[in-house]
Image (tube, rainbow, N blue to C red):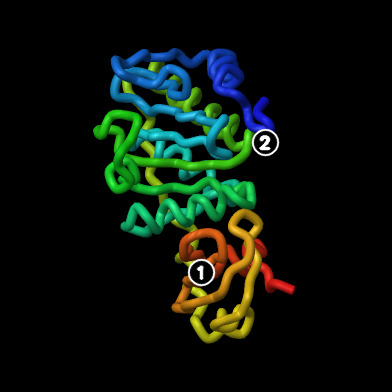
Amino acid sequence: MTETGFYSFEEVCSLIEEKGLNRFERDNADLNSIWQFGPKRSCLQAHTTVFDRYVLYATESDYNAIRKKADEEGLALILTEKSADLLDTVINEYENVKSKAILFIRNGNRIMQPSPVECSISHKIVFFTNENLEFVLDIIAENEKSRKKTGSQKVYTFVPKKEKEPEIEAEKISEIFPLESRVLHGKYGEGTVTNISDGRITVDFDDFEEKIFSATICITKSLLKKAE
C-alpha cells in the first residue's frame, strides 16, 4: 500500500485479476497507472503514488450501472459544474477529507481535458477509498458477466430519488465565516475570507493562491475552521 493507505497500482492489478477481469493494453497508454477493461471500454486510473483517489473513465453502461448501485447505497454525488477548474476544486475538497462519496461527472472526460484515455469514453467517476474501489470493480465484473451471457451489456436506467439540495445562501455562510475573517485549512494553512456567494467561499491563503470552496463541504465536513 501507499503511505496514505491506498492500494498501489500493482495491488490494484492483482485485485482486478482476482475478479476475473481482463486487461486491454492500448497503444500509448500509461501501463503504470491505467487498466483498460477492453477496446473502447472503461478505464481505471490508479495513480495513487501522487493522488489520494481512484478515477474511472466510464462507458455509458458502466456509468449508469455504478451510479444506480451507488445511489442505492447512499454514496452517489452528482457534480454538475461545467468548468474544469471548479470541478478540480470540488474533487480536491473531497479528496482532502477522504470522503466516502463517489463523485459522478457526466461527460467529465470531455470537460476536464487533457485525459489519459480515449475521448470516446465520455464519463468520469472519482472515489477516495479502497472499499469503494472494490464496490466499483464488483459492478464492472457483473456488467462483464452480463455482456458475455447475452452478447451485450445490461442496460441500466437511472431514476434519481430526490432533487439536489439547494446551495447554502451567502447570508447563512457569512454567519459562520464572516467576510475578512481568518480561517484555517488542513492543506493550505491560514487565509482570509475575501468573497462569499451562494454556495461558495473564496479564501486568499497566506502562502498559496486564492481558492474557491464549496460552502456545503466547508461547513458539513469542517474543511475550513476559524483560525484562533
Q: Position of residue 164 (x, y in %)?
A: 46, 65
Q: At x 65% / y 28%, what residue is drawn?
A: 2
Left or right: residue 135 versus residue 34 is right
Task: Name the residue that disc number 1 marks.
Answer: 204
Q: At x 39% / y 34%, what residue is drawn?
A: 57
Q: Which of the two residues, 66 or 222, is positioned nearer the viewer here?
A: 222
Identify the amino acid type marked 2. Answer: Thr
Q: Specify the quadrant that holds the N terminus.
A: top right
| Secondary-structure class at tag 2 | loop
Q: CA distance from mark 1 to mark 2?
A: 28 Å
* Callout 1–callout 2 Cβ contact below 8 Å: no
Q: Specify the quadrant that holds the C terminus.
A: bottom right
Q: Position of residue 140 (x, y in %)?
A: 47, 27
Q: Earlier in the sequence, mark 1 or mark 2?
A: 2
Identify the amino acid type marked 1. Answer: Asp
Q: Which of the two residues, 182 or 83, is positioned nearer the viewer here?
A: 182
| Secondary-structure class at tag 1 | strand
Instruction: Answer above or below: position of 224 versus 101.
Output: below
Task: Name the residue that disc number 2 marks.
Answer: 4
Residue at the far front in the pictured view? 207
Left or right: residue 125 versus residue 51 is left
Q: At x 30% / y 33%, what residue is drawn?
A: 121
Q: Which of the two residues, 35 or 59, is positioned nearer the viewer here?
A: 35
